[in-house]
Image: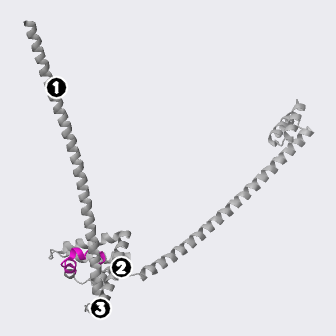
Amino acid sequence: GNKGYSRLAAALQALSRWQAAMNEWKRILKTESQHAAALKGFADCDAALKAEREKDEAEREERELEEKADNDENEEGDELDDFFNDVEEATEAVVKQKQEESKPKPTEAIKHHKKDLGTADEQIDRLLAPNHKWRNLNPFFVLDIHHSATDDDISKRYKALSLLLHPDKNQGNPKAQEAFDEVLKAKAALGDESKANYVRLLVEEGLKQGKVDWEEATQQEQTDSTVDEFQSKAVHRIFAQFEYRRKEAEELRRKNEQKIQENEDAELNKERDSRKFDKSWRKEERVDKRIGNWRDFQKKKKKKAS
């Protein structure tokens, strides 16, 4: 009875299983209310349980305080981050605005280029002057801009010139479309960096040659022209020479391709005629063979009849 319950309660209490031990001590006290060991054990377990609850409560409160402190710190940190981000964005915006204000507006730059170009009729006459197909081989001449111009300047000049010469704005001039097309070709030629660099090299070579030609003519007192005029002619000449060589190479390539194609066609025709001849010959051979077989048959038939 109570002795066994007493041992079990003591064992549970030794294992710090306070609630289970209290239940066993309670069981004993129901039958023996003044059991000394049960009274002491119940009281000890009850005290231990209260101490555990108080400890758990204190730890919980401490955790809540720590969490609250962390949250407050994070909120304060987030507010500081937001503040510094706002300051940084505002600073960047001010700097960017100043940079933009210091730059000329694209529309203003284009208007400046258009003003520098003169009238549409003047540009059309310049671009479609006699021998313009050779003169316009130099895209910098077409855009009426120095060959050392930056990509940005080239783009602005192209926009200004294309706006000036657009056929919709020059419907009274039937040559506007052709002049506009020349501008498009020039921009396309300078749109590729490698091609643009090649064009610049040609211009530089022409300028050097023009200066040499002018110096020689001046020494021999054979000209009243300026060095700029000599250089302009030399640049046009070097572009014309390269275009002539390009066309020669293109014509040579075309003739070679045509010759190769003709040889291939000749081989095909030869092979076709050969097959046709073989087919015809085999057909004639079969006919001759059939005729020969028929004659042999007739001879045999006559022999049997006789």
Q: Which mark identifies residue 204?
A: 2
For this rendering, which residue is in front, 283 or 52? 283
Q: Which mark identifies residue 218?
A: 3
Residue 86, position as x, y percentages in the image: 54, 73
Vertical comparison of 299 with 201: above or below: above
Q: Quadrant of residue 22?
A: top right
Residue 11, position as x, y percentages in the image: 87, 37
Secondary structure of residue under mark 2: helix
> Which contiguous range is marked in magenta?
123-141
Main secondary structure found in the magenta portion: helix
Residue that label 1 marks? 286
Hey, what amino acid is under mark 2?
Glu
> How far apart in space, not on screen, are marks 3 and 2 (Cα)?
21 Å
Drawn side of residue 238 relative to residue 91, left or right: left
Hey, what amino acid is under mark 1?
Arg
> How far apart in space, not on screen, are marks 2 and 1 (Cα)?
78 Å
Secondary structure of residue under mark 1: helix
Drawn side of residue 64 relative to residue 159, left or right: right
> How far apart in space, not on screen, are marks 3 and 1 (Cα)?
91 Å
Quadrant location of the C terminus?
top left
The residue at the point 80 percent across, 41 percent down is 19
The residue at the point 60 percent across, 67 percent down is 78
Residue 9 magenta: no
- Mark in the foreground, 3 or 1: 1
